[in-house]
Image: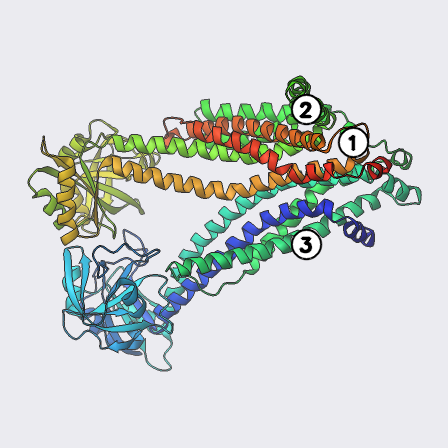
Amino acid sequence: MFRLAVKSVRQKPGRLILTAIAVALGVSLVAATFTFTGSLRNGFTKLFTDIYAGQDIIVEQDPNASVGGDQPFQEGDAIFTADDVAAVQAVDGVERAVGSVQVQATIMPKDPDAAPTFGGGPTQLFNWSGDPQLDRSTIVDGHGPEADDQIVMDIDSLTRLGYAIGDAVRVAASDGVHEFTLVGTVRFGDDNNLQGATLAYITDAAAHTLTGEPGFQGISIVTKDGADNEEVAAAITKVLPEGTHAVTGRQKADDLMSQFDTIFNYINIFAIVFALVALFVGAYIIVNTFRIIVTQRTREFGLLRAIGATGSQVRTTILLEAVIVGIVATTVGIGIGYLFALGATALVKLLGADIFGAVGLPVAGVLWSYVLGMLVTIGAAIAPAIHASRISPMEALREAATDSRKPLGRRNIVGGAMLLLGAVAVATGLYASLDRPYIYVGVGAVLLILGATLLAAQVLVPLAFGLRGVLTAWMGVDGKLAANNIHREPRRSSNTAAALMIGVMLLALTATFTESLKSLVTSEFSQIKAEFFMVDAQGFVSPDAVKLVEDTPGVDFVAPLGLGYVKYEGETYSVGITDPDLAVQVFDYDTTPEFTAVKGGVFIDSTIQALGVKVGDHVELTGEAGTQDLEVKGLYNADGDANFFVDWDTGESLVGDVDIAQAQVKLDDGTDVDEMQTTLTDALSENFPTVILQRPDQLAQLASTAIDFILATISALLMVALLIALLGVANTLLLSVTERTREIGLLRAVGVKRSSVWRMVTIESMVMAIFGTILGMILGVGLGSALVLSLKDQGFDRVAIPWVWLAVYTVLAAIAGVLAAIWPAWRASRLDILQAIAADG
């Protein structure tokens, strides 16, 4: 049976080519993503190894004890003193201990008007120890910083930012811009692999000046030869302040890598989901292909049964053909995905972001690719294989076993049941007031899609009847023949249209959801009553920047919003800190009661309410600066901002100096907004160049652009599924032409022109494409609207339908139908008349 399957595939590979391409395209998505994330992982693994290879042990604040948690690459609290460093140095096994300081700052380009480089990472600014093992860097040119106004920079950033040794370097820190003289360049590790970041060093005193704190954020340690690093780390922890610990450099690198692995895993899952969508659409091609092949080979299977082959052997032959197609297609897909990832990484590097390590396809990527490719291919071939195995020898020899002639009763019953259950599930999610209603809507959506797929044939039959008159009037006999062909094979035609329906449905659903999200975001910005919104690109807004704006003539006041973290019942939660009297003048807060009632107490969001906390209760919050017992005075009804809200005085008693996440600027009445924006922007660019000041409408436009980018990204991924669906249209038509060879030959013999045959096949394709598109748009808009409504607890309060996109999809569907028919129509029109009439079918 295996040899028979191989010979069958080799004898007529053309009928399986498009099927293999469909599988290969879906698999390539998985292979490309795993290769891409694997390369990123290699790059970050090397980065963390280079960072911590020279540090046998690292002393740091314990992330489990820190209220704010562990945030890689961010400046920590300066909690270690010179005495702590001396105590660590005295521990047995320690060769050298050096306090480390990281400054939250940005090195500005030499040319102040220069556009930011693509993919530029953050600035990593540290104190210089002079020990290459601890600094992880070696001098290339010049010398290390010897005075407090000197700086050294890594060799790649030097070129990217336009500096040369001897230049004045502008460093934007939280308290303003500082100037240093560039006295040297360094190489980080062996090849300066910084994943796009800028690395620089200054003296201890300069670093302390920029942070505004005298202490150290960590201690880097080199142990003596032969010392057990884990034992030394345990001994060091005993002499450290509470809430801090010592870990080996290897453990620190592994901990950071595990955080990035989580992100990479989410990206891989994201790609697998889209690959499953693409392969699910591809399954329709496979089912159609093997069903048509079974029909075309009816006599062949009859002869096999007549000479003694069993039904199971016939079934095995077809499944083996599917296995061969699956193996070949998956292997090709892996190769395509790898080449795509290779090209993408090379392009990103060309654009200036060298963030990748060695490019290779991980074993997990290969396994996932083969598992998905083989499961879909074999799974889709099972039904046609079972059908072929049940054909009796006499029926087969009479060629009476045409699958498409089977009644649609069972298919309609199952489809109708799924449609009904799906509608009930969606209605339950929307109207039953249950927790997490979006789960019910999601389950209902899947059932509705499957039900619509099964019932598509039932809809297509009367549609073909209805269209016959219209197509005959418009296209003459060519249109009538096309409608008859669709009506004659409703199962095949509906499967082809259903594949396109799913692709369009997902596009319409995504477009509806993102359009609703844009509407929600726009409405959020419309709640801002201030003229300007301030944020800082490198983190928190400096209080000095707020004061600079506040002291500018024409500015009425600035309302800052602080962000901190507190512990409540052992868990970490975010706390928003603001002056409520100013806040209500610049933003329409959705609170119960009025936001000004928060003074001396606390407002809580839905997350805290879900814990059973209600108005009138008392909560004990613990921050870095102290503990407060606060009365819950109201509810903060919006989600995603902060879990607790307190006034400024209460916030300072909890977290100490409040970090300003954003600030809103209110101008005096009659002040020209455009002129003031220019004035404030110029003042900030001189002293605080990383602070961004925008009008609410500009922010809304920026947010809309970001959402459009997300839509474009998802649409691009879904285009793989649409391309596969169009391959399905072409494949179905192509195999249909082969099946109807004699019919086409007879048409040509009675005088039908080649152009008429071409037009007949093209009309067939267009009808199926438009039918699938319209059905997909109805489902997509309906399910997208249901999803939005099910997320009302997350702030969604309106459905916005993207009419323009829907119109574009309809036009593109008609064009795609014409394009998909080109090859089948050409094949049909070029058939030799005598050979076609003499064909077996």
Mark 2 highlights which residue? 479
Instruction: Please tell me whether residue 586 is drawn above or below residue 8 in the rendered image.
Output: above
Q: For marks 1 and 3, give the CA distance.
A: 38 Å
Mark 2: which amino acid? Gly
- Give the number of the disc on residue 328: 3
Mark 3: which amino acid? Val
Residue 444 appears left or right of 137: right
- Name the residue furthest right: 307
- Give the number of the disc on residue 368: none
Position of residue 126 measured from the top left corner of the image (x, y, whole percent): 24, 66
Mark 2 vs mark 1: which is more N-terminal? 2
Mark 1: which amino acid? Arg
Q: Judging from the image, what secondary structure is the residue with disc 3 in?
A: helix
- Looking at the rendered image, the disc whose residue lies closer to the viewer, 2 or 1, is 1
Residue 736 appears left or right of 658: right
Residue at the spot x=86%, y=42% of the render?
A: 300
Residue at the spot x=67%, y=17% of the render?
A: 469
Q: Are marks 2 and 1 in contact (CB under 8 Å)?
A: no
Instruction: Please tell me whether residue 690 is drawn above or below residue 496 in the rendered image.
Output: below
Mark 1 highlights which residue? 748
**10 Å crowding of disc 1: few (<14), some (14-19), many (20+):** many
Mark 1 vs mark 3: which is more N-terminal? 3
Q: Judging from the image, what secondary structure is the residue with disc 1 in?
A: helix
Residue at the spot x=49%, y=59% of the render?
A: 38
Q: Is residue 650 visible?
A: yes
- Looking at the rendered image, the disc whose residue lies closer to the viewer, 2 or 3, is 2
Position of residue 719 measured from the top left corner of the image (x, y, whole percent): 53, 41
Q: Within the image, what quadrant is residue 154 found in?
A: bottom left
Residue at the spot x=83%, y=32% of the render?
A: 401
- Looking at the rendered image, the disc whose residue lies closer to the viewer, 1 or 3, is 1
**10 Å crowding of disc 3: few (<14), some (14-19), many (20+):** some
Q: For marks 2 and 1, give the CA distance.
A: 16 Å
